[in-house]
Every structure is written in C-alpha cells, then in structure tokens.
Amino acid sequence: MGDDSEWIKLPIDQKCEHKVWKARLNGYEEALKLFQKIGDEKSPEWGKYLGLIKKFVTDSNAVAQLKGLEAALAFIENAHVAGKTAGEVVSGVVTKVFNQPKARAKELGTDICLMYIEIEKAEVVQDELLKGLDNKNPKIVVSCIETLRKAL
C-alpha cells in the first residue's frame, strides 16, 4: 500500500482515470468539490471533464462509482456544456447503475436522468431509457420504467 504517493500528486482529471480505485475515488471527491466551487457555468475548467463524465458513472468499483455519480450530478447541475454528455452518460446509467443492488446508486442515476431532462435533453434521455426497456436484466427494465414515470 506504499504506492499511494504516486497518484496523490496527480491532477484531478488524471486521478479520475487512474487504474487504482482509491485514486479514482479521491479524484471523484476532488472533482465534486471543484464542481461545487466553480462559480461560472461557462468556465473553461468544465471542458476538461467532458470526456470523463461517462467514466464517473460506469466505474467498476461500487464505492468509487457512488462518488462518481455524485460528481456527475454536480457537473450536470453546474456546467453549461453538460448537455453534450447526455447520451453517453444516460446510456452508462442505464447499463451500469440501474442494475446495482445499492438503492443510493439507483437514486443518483435517476436524479442524473431527471437533471438532463431539466437542462432540455429530454429526448436523448427518453431514447436511452426506452432502449433500456429491451434489456435482459429485469432490474434495469424496472428502473427505466420508474425513471420514465418520474420524468412524466
């Protein structure tokens, strides 16, 4: 466990992509703080994270994924460029979050979908949720239906 010092010094965006889950968790926590701190919704800082938001919600480690979902939600709430990520993020939520046993993860996934609808990306969200209805996993189908119902 002595290799923590390697990733501690990395910038936030690199921590979020690191192979060690603890580094990603730390990166998501720092990203969440950063997203809540950036006052200008048009700040160039948001652009750095455009390609990473899908990874936030599809993290393979459940603990890191939960923090990634919180950071993704903060990004969507605060960044003017968030709409560009709608398709890939909602797709990730449907496939990797709605099948989670943790209620908190599903709740955050639903909140992410509803926040995209709030920022005028309803059609993209609806398309991805409807695709989720064809999934073989009944948990995903149920979560998609519940999210569609809440959206209405």
Image: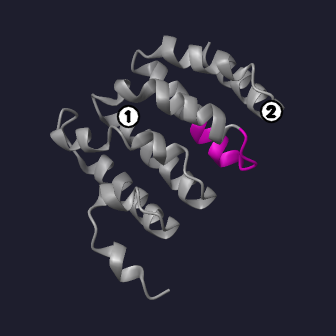
Q: Is residue 117 magenta?
A: no
- What residue appears at the point 39 percent right and 34 percent down from the top-left corner? 76
Say which residue label 1 marks: 77
User: As displayed, is residue 60 above or below residue 142?
Assistant: below
User: As displayed, is residue 56 above or below residue 89?
Assistant: below
- What residue appears at the point 32 percent right and 59 percent down from the top-left corner? 14
**Which picture quadrant has residue 150?**
top right
Q: Residues within 10 Å of mark 1 (few under 14, many from 20)?
A: some
- Looking at the image, residue 130 sits to the left or right of residue 9; the answer is right
Its colouring scheme is one colour
Q: Looking at the image, which is closer to me, 95 or 81?
A: 95
Q: Looking at the image, which is closer to me, 115 or 132?
A: 132
At mark 1, the secondary structure is helix
- Determine which of the numbered discs, if any, sits on residue 137 in the image: 2
User: As displayed, is residue 23 above or below residue 115?
Assistant: below
- What residue appears at the point 56 percent right and 52 percent down from the top-left corner? 65
**Amino acid type of the residue tagged 1 in the rendering:** Glu
**Amino acid type of the residue tagged 2 in the rendering:** Asn
- Looking at the image, residue 39 sits to the left or right of residue 81; the answer is left
Q: Which residues are magenta?
A: 99-109
- Looking at the image, residue 25 sits to the left or right of residue 49; the answer is right
- What residue appears at the point 41 percent right and 41 percent down from the top-left corner? 53
- Looking at the image, residue 69 sits to the left or right of residue 14; the answer is right
